[in-house]
Structures are given as structure tokens and as C-alpha cells.
């Protein structure tokens, strides 16, 4: 329960419309894009860094946990307030503060929607590269917290490769500025440390991002296969020939049919899998790569290769990919999206393993992933109202991630650890490595009030500092 004195202080800082505390309003902030829920006790909407500083100091006076929130599109429970307390939503800190095209930089607040950066500079021929599937809704602050990726990370990298500097508020209310607009900044890479720290070390209030020039030519291809194995083999062969597309996305037959029912993107309903391949660069180089891709696809038994002839055709192909999760949502009461990484050579065997897991746990699983870098997103479809369904779904997801570790991969490529995967961290990292992560967390947050109960396995790290595992109010 939030003390009345804390509510009065919050009203003084933010005004009467700057926070929510009724049970009805709070219910809208108890979940993100994952399957778990927990309700905050207070949701605050700062409009400036100074507001955040005052809220952090208020939380310290009353011993409140703090969870930052962007758009709530995260898929690992990162914005779920396990210990209740204060949620700081950055939706009103949504200004693009500066656009510096000569130096290819922009300065934005954390509540700026990802796609809005590109829209702001598109007329001048620039764009912001990281493009999560939720880019029309997700915010830069959340992208920084989770180190978000997207289809084009194969060539451009993930969020950390495009964040040059941060302003952040620490647990004691102090404000730090790290990194900057310069290509290289001396000292430790604290920007890299905080990017991907999932809100467990600081609250980011300003971000300097890298802008890029639009390429001269873009080609989007759809390769159609009778089997997922043939599609996966194509990805390996493309890599072996040193061809580097900016995106190679794979979707299996089940997902293709769901997308067509929803989006009508022109995907073949009878295919076993497709690859959505995008090439960028100088016109001559792109045309040469198209010819090479055609050869590889033919060698790997693609039954058809389509090349988008107009921007509208290209947009429609990507519309199908970007709206895939929504298409699945239309066909099932509930879905659980996983995020694991395997070496590219292990993609075919991992897909077969996922089929076995689906049969073992009596669930339907469709597959969509960034095939170029082995980042898989199995989508488990189920009905939570069915007795025991949630337990089977969680067990299936954990088994898939354990397999990713066993074949030399990772438990996340872009969704973060959050609360969903924290118990798998000790299967991926040694005790000494986990202890180092814990010490970084303790350095920034000795009281464990910043997003408690995330990233580290239960019983480790901050949970030992402030609370025992059973004290978390799940």
C-alpha cells in the first residue's frame, strides 16, 4: 500500500493528472507482452528528467521499488513490477530533442516511438536502423533497456550498436551523462553496460542515437520451399558464399497460413517454409547479389523465387512479417513467444527438436525467426483456461531454451532475460560470471529497488541483498 504522504508528494511533483493509483487504472499496467502479470501500486508519468529525479528521491524516502516502463511491448516480463511499488512510465517524455544530420545523430527522450525517429528524418534520406517487429509501438527507452533487435540486425546490429550516449538517473537521484556524440569517448563503455541492463541499474532519460543514410538500392525477395530444412540450408549456403543480406527472415508453413488469413501478404499457403531476404547497397552490387541468391536458392531446392517489383510489393511482404504475431493472436486465445539463439548450422536440427517438443507437451508451435543470425522465435499457441496448459507451455519453452544452450547458443537474442528466463541464467553462465553480474547490479542498486526480481536467478544477487525469494509478491 502506498502511504498517503507518498501520494501527496507525487501530486506535488506531477500534478493531479500525472499519476494513477486506483485499482481499475493500475490493472492496465500489470502486464507486458509476455504471459505473466503483477500490479504496481502507483504509476507515474514524468515529463522531464527533473521529474524523474524527484520521483526517485520520493521512492527512496518511502522504500518503494521502482520499475521503468516504455510501451509495454516487451516479451520477457521486464516491465512487470514483481514487488509492486512505483512504476515510472515514460510515455509523456516523448520528444525528439535534436536532429543533427551532418553528424548523423539524434537526441531523443525515452518515450519516443522507434519508428518516429525514421519518420522524422526520412525526407532527408536517413533512417534509424534497429527495427523490432513492434517498431510502430515500442519506444526507444524500452529498446535500450532490452537491447532490442529486429529483422535487419543481421547487417546493422542491435540497439547497442546505434546508441552513442545516455543520460540516466541513478538510485540516489543523481544524473549521469555517459558516451556522447563523438565517435569515440574515453573511459569505460558505460553506455554499453546500461544498454541491455533491463532497468536494473538506472532509469534512462535521454538517448543519443546514430542515424544512417538510406541505401541507393533495395531488393526484397521471397524464396518458397516445400520443407523448412531446405530453407535453413539456403541460409547456411548464403553465409558460406560471403553474401551478407541486411535481413534473412524465415517463416514456417503453419505461420504462413495464419498470416495470409490476417494480412493477405501474398504468401503461399501450401509452402513448408519461406525466406524473406532483403539486399541493400549500390545498384550494381545489389543486382549481382540478387543473381547469386537466385543460384543459391535453386541449388537448395527452392520451388520459386519472387522479387518485389515495386515499393508496394516490398511493403506488403514486410507487412506480413511485421504483423505475424498479431496474425497468430487472431487464431489462438493465448500465445507465448520464445526467443533463443542457435548457431546457423543448428537451425534445421533445432526446428526438428521444436516439433518433438510440441508433440511431447501437446501444444501447437509455429516458427518465425531471424534466420541469418540464428535467432529463433517459436510461438506456442494455447488456451490458458485449459487446466494445466500454462504449466505445459512454460515447460515446453524452457526445454527449447535449454536445447539452445546445449548446441552452443543463448537464451535470448533480443527479448531480454527479465523474469521469464532468469532461472536459466545459471545454465548459461558460470557461478563466477553470475557473481560478477550481481556485483555490477549491487554497485548501481545496493538496495535492490530498481526492477527487483529480474535477470539474476532466484536466490542470487539483489534478492540476497534486500529480500528473500519468497518475499517477492508474485
Image (tube, rainbow, N blue to C red):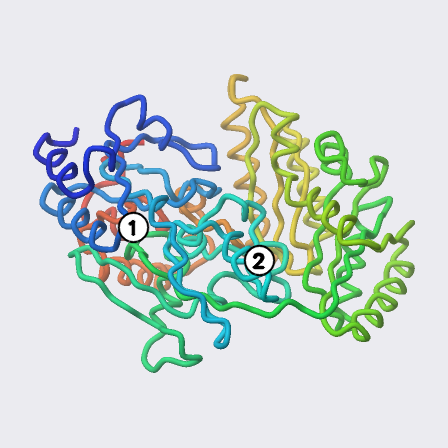
**x, y percentage for residue 281?**
72, 71
**x, y percentage for residue 348?**
74, 51
| Residue placed most toward the observer, 416 or 402 | 416
| Residue placed most toward the observer, 419 or 2 | 2
| Residue placed most toward the observer, 285 or 230 | 285
**Does label 2 or label 1 sit earlier along the sequence?**
2
Q: Secondary structure at mark 2?
A: loop
For residue 431, what is the image quadrant?
bottom left
**x, y percentage for residue 353?**
68, 44
**Residue at x 28% of width, y 58% of height:** 441
Q: Image height check: is 414 above or below 123? A: above
For residue 129, what is the image quadrant?
bottom right
**x, y percentage for residue 4?**
10, 30
The quadrant of the image that shows the N terminus is top left
**Residue at x 50% of width, y 76% of height:** 102
Answer with left or right where residue 310 lies relative to residue 165: right
- Residue 470 visible, this angle: no
Q: Mark 1 highlights which residue?
A: 460
Q: Mark 2 highlights which residue?
A: 409
Query: How many numbered marks, from 0 up?
Result: 2
Amino acid at each position: 500500500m502506498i502511504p498517503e504522504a507518498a501520494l501527496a508528494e507525487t501530486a506535488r511533483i506531477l500534478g493531479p493528472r500525472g499519476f494513477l493509483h486506483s485499482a481499475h487504472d493500475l490493472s492496465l499496467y500489470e502486464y507486458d507482452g509476455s504471459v505473466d502479470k503483477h500490479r504496481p501500486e502507483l504509476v507515474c508519468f514524468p515529463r522531464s528528467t527533473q521529474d524523474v529525479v524527484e520521483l526517485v528521491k520520493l521512492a527512496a524516502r518511502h522504500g518503494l521499488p521502482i520499475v521503468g516502463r516504455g510501451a509495454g511491448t516487451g516479451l520477457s516480463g521486464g516491465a512487470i513490477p514483481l514487488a509492486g511499488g512505483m512504476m515510472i512510465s515514460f510515455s509523456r517524455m516523448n520528444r525528439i530533442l535534436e536532429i543533427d544530420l551532418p553528424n548523423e545523430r539524434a537526441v531523443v527522450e525515452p518515450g519516443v516511438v522507434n519508428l518516429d525517429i525514421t519518420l522524422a528524418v526520412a525526407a532527408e534520406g536517413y533512417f534509424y536502423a534497429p527495427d523490432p517487429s513492434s517498431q510502430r509501438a515500442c519506444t526507444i527507452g524500452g529498446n535500450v533497456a532490452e537491447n532490442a533487435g529486429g529483422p535487419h540486425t543481421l547487417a546493422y546490429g542491435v540497439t547497442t550498436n546505434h546508441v552513442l550516449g545516455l543520460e540516466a538517473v541513478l538510485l540516489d537521484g543523481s544524473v549521469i551523462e555517459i558516451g556522447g556524440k563523438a565517435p569515440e569517448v574515453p573511459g569505460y563503455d558505460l553506455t554499453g553496460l546500461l544498454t541491455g541492463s533491463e532497468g536494473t541499474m538506472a532509469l534512462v532519460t535521454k538517448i543519443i542515437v546514430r542515424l544512417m543514410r538510406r541505401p541507393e538500392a533495395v531488393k526484397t525477395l521471397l524464396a518458397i520451399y516445400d520443407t523448412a530444412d531446405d530453407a535453413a540450408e539456403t541460409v547456411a549456403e548464403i553465409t558460406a558464399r560471403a553474401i551478407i543480406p541486411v535481413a534473412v527472415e524465415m517463416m514456417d508453413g503453419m505461420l504462413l497460413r495464419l498470416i495470409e488469413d490476417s494480412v493477405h501478404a501474398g504468401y503461399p499457403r501450401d509452402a513448408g517454409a519461406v525466406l524473406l531476404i532483403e539486399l541493400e547497397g549500390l545498384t550494381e552490387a545489389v543486382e549481382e547479389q540478387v543473381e547469386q541468391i537466385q543460384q543459391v536458392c535453386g541449388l537448395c531446392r527452392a520451388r520459386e523465387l519472387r522479387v518485389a517489383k515495386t515499393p508496394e510489393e516490398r511493403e506488403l511482404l514486410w507487412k506480413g512479417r511485421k504483423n505475424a504475431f498479431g496474425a497468430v493472436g487472431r487464431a489462438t486465445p493465448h500465445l507465448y513467444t520464445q526467443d533463443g539463439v542457435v548457431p546457423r548450422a543448428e537451425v534445421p536440427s533445432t526446428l526438428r527438436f521444436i516439433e518433438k517438443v510440441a508433440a511431447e507437451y501437446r501444444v501447437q508451435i509455429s516458427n518465425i525467426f531471424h534466420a541469418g543470425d540464428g535467432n529463433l522465435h517459436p510461438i506456442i499457441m494455447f488456451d490458458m483456461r485449459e487446466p494445466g496448459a500454462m504449466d505445459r507451455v512454460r515447460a515446453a519453452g524452457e526445454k527449447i531454451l535449454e536445447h539452445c544452450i546445449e548446441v552452443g547458443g543463448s537464451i535470448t537474442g533480443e527479448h531480454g532475460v527479465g523474469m521469464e528466463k532468469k532461472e536459466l541464467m545459471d545454465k548459461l553462465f558460470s557461478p563466477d560470471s553470475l557473481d560478477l553480474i550481481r556485483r555490477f547490479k549491487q554497485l548501481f542498486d545496493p538496495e535492490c529497488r530498481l526492477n527487483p526480481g529480474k535477470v539474476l536467478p532466484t536466490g542470487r544477487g539483489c534478492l540476497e541483498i534486500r529480500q528473500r525469494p519468497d518475499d517477492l509478491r508474485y
